[in-house]
Image: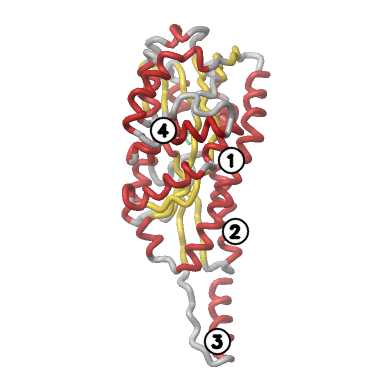
Amino acid sequence: MSMIRNTLTAFALAGAVGLTPAIAAAQNMRIGLITPPNHVWSQAAVAMGEELNEATGGRITLQAFPGGQLGNEAQMLQMLQTGALDMAFMTVAEISNRVPEFGAFFAPFLADDISHAARIIRSDVATELLDLLPEEAGVMGLGFGSAGMRQMVSRVAVSTAADLNGLKIRITPVDAFRDFYNALGTAPTPMPLPAVYDALANAQVDAIDMDAELIWAMRYFEQAPTVLETNHALFPMVGLVSGRVWAGLDGDDQTLIRETMQRHLDATIDTYIEKDPEWMAQVEAEESVNYSRIGPDFFADAIAEWEATWAERAPVLSALRAVADETR
Ligand code: BEZ
């Protein structure tokens, strides 16, 4: 209703001053995510939609589809490429399967902690990577968000790197994580987020690679009581718009969508700086949890092996490591 009213008002005003109005087209858009509805990313997507709606008097609407309702990330990326989906908040993991340069973000122990991770994600070197996306993936990357740092949760006790040997560990489907866990002598098992809870509950995997928010919210530790606070990798998210859809938007709408999305993406980075340590502290305080903190020394050989492969696959890695050193 409000969109019709606004359109009519625009016509009436233009008529009063004798102009032919240029009315921007209505946009009923959809954004897809694999995260559950109450997750930080899903809430950011809803808030972004509300803001776009309000800023345009209802001319732009954005409906969020969380929980993988539109498919997994690989499927959503395809939909973005054809224009069947307008937007997504997507793991950099999926993007790095298409554009290996993005795999540099997953360098083991690139960041010391969540605040350091934020400085790396917000760096110019990171931002410039987004320029690769239109050509190499058919999507516009408008900015980065975050999902905190990666940790491990295991059904079996782990006190040395040797204890990880042969364990079937769920990973986000991404080559960079697969290579790290292979180097550790585990059996990495790629699995999209929505499948993880049941797989752990049914003992299809021995352990999972996961972030603090979901370890706490999904209470994976009730199935797998050993929690290793490793902070072994960053986990950036990228805000995408279909290249085809983007090309059909007028310049003002592009600016509005870019600025609004960037603000909401960036806010997720601040949320994880504040909340990651709180979530991990809550997990540690659980009586059933066997909690330990593990640093890079534990993984030393695997880190060197990973680096040898990825220095070649993602040449931006050296620049990203330089950013990490400068921002320590
Ligand atoms: C995961 O694959 O572990 C994941 C995906 C999206 C957000 C957070 C975690």
Q: Residue at x 59, y 86 (%)?
A: 13
Q: Is residue 65 above or below residue 236?
A: below
Q: Earlier in the sequence, mark 4 or mark 1?
A: 1
Cα distance between the residues tagged 2 and 3 = 26 Å
Q: Is residue 328 visible?
A: yes
Q: Is residue 287 above or below residue 110?
A: above
Q: Nearer the viewer, residue 276 or 114?
A: 114
Q: Is residue 264 above or below residue 224?
A: below
Q: Earlier in the sequence, mark 3 or mark 4?
A: 3
Cα distance between the residues tagged 1 and 2 = 19 Å
Identify the image quadrant of residue 185: top left
Cα distance between the residues tagged 3 and 4 = 54 Å
**Would you name the residue on which mark 4 appears?**
317
Q: Earlier in the sequence, mark 2 or mark 3?
A: 3
Q: Is residue 244 left or right of residue 239?
A: left
For mark 3, give the secondary structure: helix
**Would you name the residue on which mark 1 appears?**
269
Q: Amino acid at mark 4?
A: Leu
Tell me residue 168's x, y (percent).
39, 16
Cα distance between the residues tagged 1 and 3 = 43 Å
Q: Amino acid at mark 1?
A: Ile
Q: Earlier in the sequence, mark 1 or mark 2?
A: 2
Q: Is residue 204 visible?
A: no
